Amino acid sequence: MNIDVRKVAMLARIRLTDEEAAELGPQLAQILGYIEQLSEIDTDDIPPTAHPHDVAMPLRPDIVTNGNRRDALQQPAPATEAGLYIVPKVIE
């Protein structure tokens, strides 16, 4: 298996020295060989493992419980206009 370690490093935005590239080439080839070996295993009759997201989450009713309280919440504000807070100009 011929792997261009320099190209992989460039795509991953990793800077490698020549010594690191020479050391990582065989290691990367070994990892990819192992993955290739795993992909040859027949898993057709094996059920998938459990996953926490497989369980259905209970849903609550989609009803409004907290109505529009904008007027009550803006009442203590020094100044409002059209439902917005009026604040002093900060940047000139």
Image (cartoon, rainbow, N blue to C red):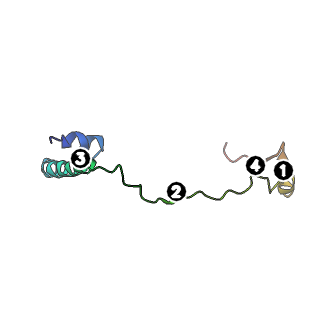
Q: Residues within 10 Å of mark 2 (few under 14, many from 20)?
A: few
Q: Earlier in the sequence, mark 2 or mark 1?
A: 2
Q: Secondary structure at mark 4?
A: loop
Task: Kindly identify which residue carries mark 3.
Answer: 36
**In the rendered view, does 61 fall on the left or right side of 77?**
left
Q: Nearer the viewer, mark 2 or mark 1?
A: 2
If you read the primary sequence from the N terminus, does the residue marked by circle 3 or circle 2 appear first? 3
**CA gap, disc 1 and disc 3:** 68 Å
Q: Residue at x 36, y 52 (%)?
A: 45
- According to the picture, the residue beneath numbered tag 4 turns out to be 88
Looking at marks 4 and 1 on the same chain, the residue that comes earlier in the sequence is marked by: 1
**What is the x, y in percent for residue 5?**
19, 43
Residue occupied by mark 2: 53
Q: Nearer the viewer, residue 2 or 12?
A: 2
Q: Quadrant of residue 4?
A: top left
Contact between marks 1 and 3 (CB within 8 A): the answer is no
Cα distance in 3D space between marks 4 and 2: 49 Å
Between discs 4 and 3, the one toward the N terminus? 3
**Residue that lies at the very extreme toward the front in this rendered image:** 45
Q: Residue at (16%, 48%) from the top-left corner?
A: 25
Q: Which residue is mark 1?
A: 79
